[in-house]
Image (spheres, helix red, strand yellow):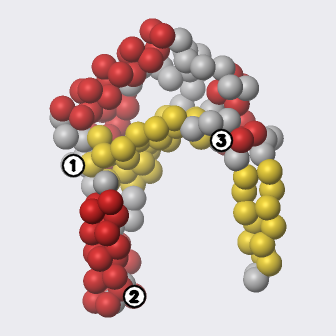
Amino acid sequence: MRCMILVKANHDTENGVMPSEQLLADMGRYNEELVKAGIMLAGEGLHPSARGARVRFDGSQRSVIDGPFAETKELIAGFWLWQVRDLDEAIEWVKRCPNPTGEASEIEIRPLFEAADFGEEFTPELREQEERLRAEIAARQ
């Protein structure tokens, strides 16, 4: 099972406060554990929402909303992409994570859709296209 691990933003992350050297070292050790265990596929921190944008869709219309975005508790400060056996394994790994903010915070775990989740609507042609695109992406890395 692949899952995305979402580190929630807070006032400090949204104001560009950088993590301490200690937190960077702790996270580095944690990331090493994830890599050695064969779990971590990717992981990055995100700039504050002030440096981002949203594109709103309304039928065929598109509009751009520049950051910052108001609801800090709903924003993401970073993420990991993991390959785990199941949700329980992901939970156990998250419980080992250094506290990313040093204060009360949450880390969200969201399973990714896999081809089998889409049923018959995901035709053999669409599956082939998906596999081809994944191979192209892997070849670029």
Specify the label residue 121 is tagged with. Answer: 2
- Tell me the amino acid under the disc marked 1: Arg
111 in relation to 89, above or below: below
Image quadrant occupied by the C terminus: bottom left
Q: Is residue 73 visible?
A: no
Res 116 → quadrant: bottom left
Q: Earlier in the sequence, mark 2 or mark 3?
A: 3
- Residue 72 in percent (x, y) is at 72, 36
- Residue 7 in percent (x, y) is at 52, 35
The mark lying in front, picked from 2 and 3, is 3
Name the residue tied to disc 1.
85
Residue at x-position 38% and y-position 15%: 26
Name the residue tied to disc 3.
75
In the image, 13 versus 85, the foreground residue is 13
Q: Residue furthest left?
A: 37
Residue 3 in the figure: left or right of residue 83: right
- Residue 109 in percent (x, y) is at 44, 44
Mark 1 Cα-neighbour bin, 10 Å: few <14, some 14–19, many ≥20 = few
The span from disc 2 to disc 3 (Cα, nearest Å) is: 32 Å
Q: Earlier in the sequence, mark 1 or mark 2?
A: 1
Q: Earlier in the sequence, mark 3 or mark 1?
A: 3
- Tell me the amino acid under the disc marked 3: Leu
- Tell me the amino acid under the disc marked 2: Glu
